Amino acid sequence: MPAQPSAQAGTTTQPADLTWLLHRAAQRMRAALDQVAKAQGLAGVRDWIVLSALIAQPGRTQLALGHALGLDKTTLTSQLDRLETGGLIIRSLNPHDRRARIPEITTAGRRIQARVTRARDHTETELLKAFSTQEQRLLRELLTRLAASEHGDCLHASGSCI
């Protein structure tokens, strides 16, 4: 169990466990963003993350997309199947390797991704109201540095983000 502050005066306490705090903060953000995504017609925030990844780096194969998002082939395939059924993506054959498929976001997918992004921004603003503008900037800066890969790039680091 993580160390928690003591209510008794005069006792020495350890600081709260950072991993636990980050996990709980991520859970809170994820729950709020799941609601936002569902309100826009997606199954949850995972769908928005995939759509956003397709916009950020178009032309990646499913394998490369799965690696970037930290998703195994089976999980990503079922998610892409659902997005394709909903008309939010299409998949085409890779012209260099006919065994590989390249998911591409559709116009409908771009519209819903943009709506969720706007709603996400509003939700983040509400969740971060407890912090000053300077504290919010510092929080983002510190988390960006903490999340960065060994090459200093947190936005393109591999590993599960969903």
Image (spheres, helix red, strand yellow):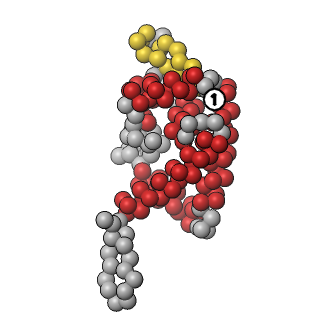
* Residue 52 appears in the picture as rendered: no
Q: Quadrant of the N terminus?
A: bottom left
Which residue is found at the position 51% from the left and 50% from the top?
30
Q: Quadrant of the C terminus?
A: top left
Answer left or right for 142 relative to 44. Answer: left
Nearest the camera: 3 or 157?
A: 3
The quadrant in which residue 39 appears is top right
Residue that numbered label 1 is attached to: 109
Which residue is found at the position 63% from the left and 29% from the top?
109
Answer left or right for 37 relative to 99. Answer: right
Q: How many marks?
A: 1
Residue 12 at what x, y percent from top left?
A: 31, 83
Check disc 1 and report its element: helix, strand or loop: helix
Q: Is residue 146 above or below residue 41?
A: below
Q: Is residue 8 above or below residue 44?
A: below
Q: Residues within 10 Å of mark 1 (few under 14, many from 20)?
A: many
Residue 68 at what x, y percent from top left?
A: 42, 34
Which three-letter amino acid code belongs to the residue tagged 1?
Gly
Nearest the camera: 9 or 141?
A: 9
Q: Residue furthest bottom?
A: 10
Answer left or right for 30 relative to 72. Answer: right
Which residue is found at the position 42% from the left and 50% from the top?
147
Residue 108 at what x, y percent from top left?
A: 67, 27
The quadrant in which residue 97 appears is top left
Q: Is residue 103 above or below residue 75?
A: above
Residue 130 at what x, y percent from top left?
A: 59, 68
Which residue is found at the position 56% from the left and 36% from the top?
43
* Residue 20 appears in the picture as rendered: yes
